[in-house]
Amino acid sequence: MTDRFGRCIDYMRVSITDRCNLRCRYCMPDGIRLAQHCDILSYEDILRICGLAVSLGIVKFKVTGGEPLVRKGCTDFITRLKALPGVEQVTITTNGLLLMDSLPRQAEGYQTGTSLNNLDALCDAGIDGINISLDTMCEAEYKKLTGYSGEAVSIIKRALVKCTERDLRVKVNTVLLARTLNSLSHVAGLAAELPVDVRFIELMPIGKGTETEGISVEAAFRRLTKSWPDIRPIKEKRGNGPAHYYTAAGLKGRIGFIDAMSHRFCGECNRVRLTATGDFKPCLCYDAAVDLRALLRNGRSDTDIMAAMNDCMWQKPRAHCFSRVQSVTEKKTMNRIGG
């Protein structure tokens, strides 16, 4: 699918839940409104939409939330999504805390008594990559940011090691926050310790992000040069997103930056989003969307649904307006729009 500005739209972020086991301050702190269960798309509905999306040229999918692994049957859903004819790639974004959790012994497709965790199931499904969100390596700061009461960083670190042992393509996503500026090099150090890419993402003025102080990629880069004075850019395409990557002596992975605020990359945007409640969104910045849930529940045909999706993609705006916060029309919190 090519939109009216000549961009090839071949990638869709698919949110399967707005629930999460964390309460990150810039995403979904305590007290925010969650969708009712009856408003969440069924897996069958999501698979139907994804199948139609493939017919429109969308062949790469990112499964998100909220936290996707909190929804029962997530790994089985990914198995089915990966098996859809025409699907080329399925990846997942997770906070990593549930990757090593055991699945029920009666998990679909496995014999009773099989010892299986979410990571095993994702690998068996043929997952093409895992993105793990981690904003700090400090346990105390992690607890303040997320409300998590356990030793989260050690759990996530163990999951990262296990992912690399399975030869998975792994990225660590870190939102650039003023409060964690002094510890950025510790997160970046994961790329020296493990063959993973660490990506620093500028905070966007969406939902509770408007109430949180972020920092620019330039500020983060200056801080990282103190630890890696030889850091230098490389021209590598290492995924579907807009990150630009750097290397330095001693790094096993790469350090990347996603600078949505300071350097717009809208001219190369290749994505659309499906929220857990069925909104098909062409741009994160605006509230414009087509309600696919309504079409599904009103018994509309595949042809009608595809036409609505096609029209929505055609109306994808030329660029976001994050630099003019007053013009941002998307007011929902990030967990409700899938990040």
Image (spheres, rainbow, N blue to C red):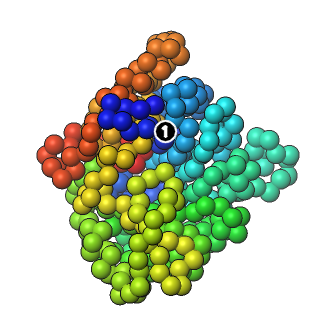
Q: Secondary structure at mark 1?
A: loop
Image position of 47 with respect to 251: above or below: above
Q: Locate residue 63, reporting x and y percent.
A: 53, 45
Q: Nearer the viewer, residue 264 or 290?
A: 264
Q: Which residue is mark 1?
A: 10
Image position of 248 with respect to 326: above or below: below
Residue lying at 49% horizontally and 58% vertically, measured from the top left: 237
Residue lying at 56% horizontally and 38% vertically, measured from the top left: 59
The quarter holding residue 3 reads top left
One can see residue 297 in this view: no
Q: Locate residue 100, reporting x and y percent.
A: 66, 62
Q: Locate residue 239, reporting x and y percent.
A: 51, 55
Q: Nearer the viewer, residue 179 or 29?
A: 179
The quarter of the picture where the N terminus appears is top left
Residue lying at 58% horizontally and 57% vertically, measured from the top left: 130
Image position of 93 with respect to 39: above or below: below
Residue lying at 44% horizontally and 53% vertically, measured from the top left: 241
Q: Locate residue 138, reporting x and y percent.
A: 44, 78
- Indicate left or right for 250 with 277 as reference: right
